[in-house]
Amino acid sequence: MLDDDGEGNTRRIDLDDYKRLIVISFGKAGASMLAALMQRIPDGIDVRGLCSSPEPTEIKYRHFKFFTGGHPLPNQDSLAAGREALDILRKIRKDSFVLYLISGGGSAMLETALDKQIPMEDIRAFHETLVACGATISEVNTVRRFFSGVKGGRLAQAAGGCDKLTLLLADVPLREMEAVASSPTLPNQTPLAACEEVLERYQLLEVFPASVRRFFEELRAGEWPLPPSAEDVAFHNADFRVLLSNHDFVDAAQRAAEDLGYAVTVDNSCDDWDYEAASRYLLDRFHTLRLESSKTCLISSGELSVKLPVEHGCGGRNQQFALTCAFDLARFEGLPMVVLSAGSDGVDGNSPAAGAMADTTTLARARQQNFDPEAHRRHFDACPLFTAIGDSIVTGPTGNNLRDLRIFVAAAPAQLSINESDR
């Protein structure tokens, strides 16, 4: 087996040196990554492990257990997968090689609370509260690392001093690798104080279930172990490689747009911003750029934060972003402009869509079908509106997850000038 660090440096791993290959594959690409690996494993290698992915897998492998994990909230299979992974890893001998195949969504699809007394419904409530509180994904994962029995390096710690390798599809900025699936195989670099700061900023302890609140109080009192640091023996023989990242996703989109003759600008500076602030910034940038070229394309990637109200409808951050942009684009009806926002995993929030498109006619077409766009935007209920007018993007789960992509396109010179007061 060859291990490439992404910069052309390849190291050969001879599986004949080990008695057994243990594979732990989980996340939105869990099944596809495992299938790709199994096609390349030489005959005679004793390989076993587990896979937790969002959809039932068509192909099963001998000596593997399969789980259909939940997302964005863990389900019973997520917890069963977490317990099984720890059980497998804690029982292996040092003559085994451990291969972790990790992709975005893994935080929910392989999980268990460090405190085994916390019930399933409270674990789900913990995840749901975090996702909806308006915190960035980095802040969310900071809290998860201290709560979980598998995150923050604990999945690697379970395998002790065995040789191990993590292969990753990154759904976070490359500078924040510890955020992928809340870093189950990387040493923890975050102090407890950072976790406590997030809890305080979003007043989370006040809304967590009592069992979760009690856990964090006991954690602060030193009654629970902290995630392992780089000094732990688990990381002495561990390696880590990124197979694909958001950069590859954006590069592919940029090449496609350039092949169609568009002048392309990539701006990822609003990553992790609130969706409304990001829409204002990107629309302002887009309107400036489209005055400079007859065929303009602005590409922006990364994930935006959305704070959900207690009562909300069907949709996700991409459809909410697209609907918000539609209010701006409506001012320029007749001009060929369109905005697309979609998730590379094929799933946007609690909806069946990956995202949506909006143009200068979106609001008018929605009103013709008796929709109130402002009410749907206010109630985070964009999916029914976009579905009715035919502008939802529905791909189904893609078996991948390289973050969200937003594309702004203007296909002809602007005929109207934009006053600063209109922006």
Image: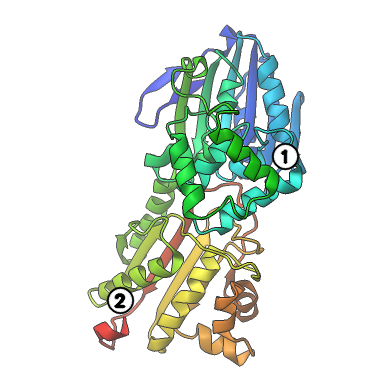
Q: Which residue is drawn at 64% across and 48% down?
A: 126
Q: Is residue 58 visible?
A: no
Would you identify the image quadrant in which residue 48 lies?
top right
Residue 370: x percent and y percent?
64, 90
Any mark on residue 162, and which? Answer: none
Q: Tag 1's secondary structure?
A: loop
Q: Which residue is drawn at 61% across and 58% down?
A: 347
Q: Nearer the viewer, mark 1 or mark 2?
A: 1
* Residue topped by disc 1: 118
Q: Can residue 300 be seen in this view?
A: yes
Q: Tag 2's secondary structure?
A: helix
Q: Distance between the residues labelled 1 and 2?
A: 51 Å
In the depicted structure, whether residue 205 falls above or below residue 162: below
Any mark on residue 287, and which? Answer: 2
Q: Which residue is drawn at 48% across and 15% down?
A: 237
Q: What residue type is labelled 1?
A: Ile
Which of pointers 1 and 2 lies earlier in the amino acid sequence? 1
> Would you say 141 lies left or right of 414 here?
right
- Crowding at dot 2, Cα within 10 Å, few <14 / some 14-19 / many 20+, comes out as some
Q: Which of 406 and 376 is in front in this view?
A: 376
Would you identify the image quadrant in which residue 189 lies?
top left
* The C terminus lies in quadrant: bottom left
Residue 257: x percent and y percent?
37, 62
Q: Which amino acid does label 2 sit on?
A: His
In the depicted structure, whether residue 4 falls above or below residue 124: above
* Residue found farthest to the front: 221
* Residue found farthest to the left: 292
Residue 364: x percent and y percent?
52, 89
> Would you say 149 lies left or right of 359 here?
right
Q: Which residue is drawn at 37% across and 51% down?
A: 251
